[in-house]
Amino acid sequence: MSTLMPSVAATTLPPELPARCGMADQGLDAAAFRSALARFPSGVTIVTTRSAGGTSHGFTASSFAALSLDPPLVLVCLDQGADCFPAFIAAEQFVVNIVTPAHAKLAKRFATKGEDKFAHGSFESDEGGHPILPDAAAIIRCELEQAVPGGDHVILIGRVHDARIGSGKPVMWYRGDFLHLGQSVT
């Protein structure tokens, strides 16, 4: 682990984040803000981990990005209200599966609270027992380097220790729906 960046063991999220001004307090129209964000196409990922007890957990994220090439770091944002939030904060590793159009239904399921997310997926386990989508456009396995609070989300920073490329094309999220690469936008 990097000496410049505290490890997850040294990083603890406060039990309650400090009170902040909400959008209404700032005069920001929440609907306009969401609509503006929807105009930015982004990739779609299903992020997975396995708890110490062996239970699989996951969520859909479109807030995913490369952070650094040296060392190899990525970031993904997780809603603090997500059912899987405690599992990811406690996890030592997680996997980012970059989804293809064939995973659209699965990605919607992983974006929904309370679902048995792994009931109908085509997941396999990697060498560490973490769920992976073998037909994903790419699979990026990470060690949790740091968790950084960010509003109502937490930014999970992962040190990449393995990246595999699949044959499928990734899908985008745009204006509340999936957009296939090469598809015309109206």
Image (cartoon, rainbow, N blue to C red):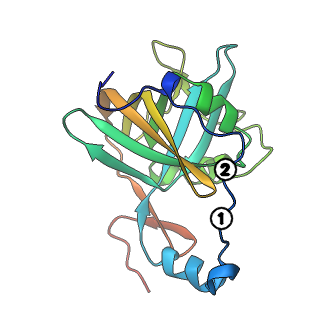
| Residue under the point 72% across and 49% down | 81
Element type at mark 2: loop
Of 2 and 180, which appears nearest the observer? 2
Q: Is residue 44 left or right of residue 52?
A: left
Q: Quadrant of the N terminus?
A: top left
Mark 1 highlights which residue? 20
Q: Residue at coordinates 67% horizontally, 39% vertically from top-left?
A: 85
In this rendering, the answer to whether 180 lies above or below 61 is below
Identify the residue under disc 2.
17
Q: Is residue 137 in view from this perspective?
A: no
Q: Is residue 158 left or right of residue 163?
A: right
From the viewer's side, name the closer residue of 81 and 180: 81
The percent position of residue 26, horizontal first and vertical second, equals 62, 82
Residue type highlighted by circle 2: Leu
| 66 or 148: nearer the viewer | 148
Circle 1 — which element?
Answer: loop
Q: Quadrant of residue 12?
A: top right
